[in-house]
Amino acid sequence: MGLCWGSPSNNQTPSTTGHFSTSAGGISQTTGNATSSIGSNISGNSRFSVASGNDEPYTGGQILPDSNLRIFSFLELKTATKSFRVDTVLGEGGFGKVYKGWLEEKVTSKSGSGSVVAIKKLDSESMQGFDEWQSEVHFLGRLSHPNLVKLLGYCWEDNELLLVYEFMQKGSLENHLFGRGAAVQPLPWDIRLKILIGAAQGLAFLHTSEKQVIYRDFKASNILLDGCYNAKISDFGLAKLGPSASKSHITTRVMGTSGYAAPEYVATGHLYVKSDVYGFGVVLIEMLTGQRAVDPTRPGGRLNLVDWIKPHLSDRRKLKHVMDAQLQGKYPSKAALQIAQLALKCIEPEQKTRPSMKVVVETLEHLVENDEKPKEPSVHLRNRTSSHHPRGTQQPLQHRSPLHPRHHDHQSYQLPPPAR
């Protein structure tokens, strides 16, 4: 499992000023031979620009002044997936099915020249539907960063809604952490750290524009991995523009995934930029323990990972007993404790006390700079399932998701209404 630490992010253009507007952000619909457009559902007064607050803009990406998405015909995508054949299905989620497709290059006469893509097709009975499809187009059509999945284009033809993404060879982080079978390889420590840094850089980029983007659904299944295990955040269906300069939060219907959603958001519907930081903290804990954020098969009242593991995160000896058995003890204990302590800060009940994602990135990068190598365990570990890792009881995942749809057990949905 080779590492490709060389990141293209250092060569990217820094964040630039741009706008979401009805003129530049329109979406075209094809109906028969005619093409019509609708404006963005995001106010034309909303701006994307570099940060003016305490955090400097996180470089490595850019905000495009205009969307550069390609508009595909339904016939093109039908051909690319062999009429949406069953054997091209990569997975299925709340939005619909995701297919592996092959797009032929039009600019060359060479036969067989083209590219592999992932195509998400809206299920006509989907409850998530048009709003989330439109949100993906508006956000990923304008945001460009090495740690955000690239949206190549879309199709809106009659009642057909589709999205076309770059193909992510290694699938989702969720599948690598929790999947089983010969096709799923356990992630060694250094790759886990690399994935965490990449995902943190993606969130930091979203958060450090003046009109910040709140991702709202950060979780392991939405972190996709390319062939070199570079992490990219996917699925912007629930993303929101952040609050105005005079406000600390926005108020919105409570949506997200149980176990990852920040407590203040679930309780009040108040969504803060640092609500995303809570979700990142949960993923940190998943990466350390190899356990799901919510798992009803865990015994002894351990349904919620944060509630169960939190007392173990500040003590090295306690932490050792809940570390992922698949690491086989091959991890630097000092770095693991530092990440556990960072996770504790990220899941603070009060959002104001959580670190910014910029600070999170710097903390994780510092661990790499210290370059503490994973140590071999002093005692040989047998291949067994420990009492705190009931992996045998978990439902297997299909080896899937170059563009990972929502997993049924962790599907994004409307959470219960806030308590009065």
Image (spheres, rainbow, N blue to C red):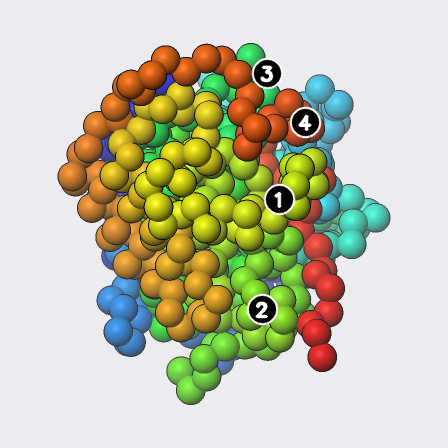
C-alpha gap between disc 2 and disc 1? 22 Å
> Residue 54: horizontal and vertical position, in percent?
26, 74
Answer with left or right where residue 410 lies relative to residue 53: right
Residue at (45, 80) in percent of width and height: 248
Residue 87 in sight here = yes
Q: Nearer the viewer, mark 3 or mark 1?
A: 1
> Residue 10: horizontal and vertical position, in percent?
22, 44
Which quadrant of the rendered structure holds the C terminus? bottom right
Q: Check whether the beta carbons of the residues at disc 3 and disc 4 lie within 8 A of each other.
A: no
The amino acid type found where label 4 is placed reads Thr
Q: Nearer the viewer, residue 392 or 137?
A: 392
The amino acid type found where label 1 is placed reads Arg
C-alpha gap between disc 3 and disc 4? 14 Å
For disc 4, the marked residue is 393
The crowding category of the residue bearing disc 4, from other C-alpha atoms within 10 Å (few below 14, some 14 to 19, many at least 20), is few
Mark toward the start of the polypeptide (3 vs 4):
3
